[in-house]
């Protein structure tokens, strides 16, 4: 029986070393997989960084949408006034088309002031703009 004992002892040592190595390999693979998945969660195509960038883009687009809605409402109000309010129609015709009533005289001044050579000519310069007189 003494010859059988060393064989059993050798087999048990081999089996225990194989289990230890297998356990270490499995632990190493589990750590590598955990690192890979952690990296993928942070920096992957749909990771946290991409998610935060999409949230910032969403906020920017939401602000742009709100400003466009406000501009759209303002333009709708302007169209409604132009369709129903005679004063708004007259104001628009005067402002955009430079219309005037038959008894009015319109004075138009230059848009860009001429460069002044002395102080007396700059003091007598008239204000810019359009004036209507009855």
Image (cartoon, grey):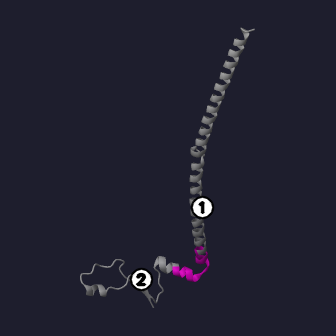
How many C-alpha atoms fall within 10 Å of the one at disc 1: few (<14), some, or many (≥20)?
Answer: few
Residue sitting farthest toward the bottom: 134
Residue pictured at 47% horizontal, 87% vertical = 102
Q: Earlier in the sequence, mark 2 or mark 1?
A: 1
User: Which residue is labeled 2 in the image?
Assistant: 130
Give the residues in magenta: 78-91
> Which x, y percent locates residue 86?
58, 82
Looking at the rendered image, the quarter that the N terminus falls into is: top right
**Left or right of 71 in this view: 22:** right
> Which x, y percent locates residue 120?
26, 87
Looking at the rendering, which quadrant does residue 127 occupy? Answer: bottom left
Which secondary structure lies at badge 1?
A: helix
Query: Is residue 81 a member of the stretch shown in magenta?
Result: yes
**Which residue is more in the foreground, 74 or 56?**
56
Looking at the rendering, which quadrant does residue 16 occupy? Answer: top right
Residue pictured at 64% horizontal, 25% vertical = 21
Labels in figure, total: 2
| 28 versus 90 height, above or below | above
Q: CA distance from mark 2 to mark 1?
A: 40 Å
> Which x, y percent locates residue 64?
56, 63
User: Which residue is labeled 1 in the image?
Assistant: 62
Query: Is residue 65 a member of the stretch shown in magenta?
Result: no
**Which residue is more in the foreground, 94 or 112?**
112
Magenta segment's dominant SS is: helix
**Which residue is more in the foreground, 120 or 52?**
52
How many C-alpha atoms fall within 10 Å of the one at disc 2: few (<14), some, or many (≥20)?
Answer: few
| 108 versus 48 height, above or below | below
> Which x, y percent locates residue 50?
57, 49
């Amino acid at each position: 029986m003494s010859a059988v004992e060393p064989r059993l002892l050798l087999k048990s040592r081999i089996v225990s070393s194989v289990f230890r190595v297998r356990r270490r390999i499995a632990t190493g693979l589990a750590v590598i997989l955990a690192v890979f998945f952690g990296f993928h969660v942070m920096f992957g195509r749909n990771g946290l960084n991409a998610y935060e960038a999409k949230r910032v883009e969403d906020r920017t687009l939401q602000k742009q949408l709100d400003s466009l809605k406000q501009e759209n409402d303002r333009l709708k109000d302007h169209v409604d006034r132009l369709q129903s309010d005679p004063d708004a129609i007259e104001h628009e015709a005067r402002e955009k088309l430079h219309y005037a009533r038959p008894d009015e005289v319109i004075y138009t001044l230059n848009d860009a002031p001429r460069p002044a050579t002395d102080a007396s000519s700059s003091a007598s310069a008239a204000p810019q703009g359009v004036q209507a007189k009855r």
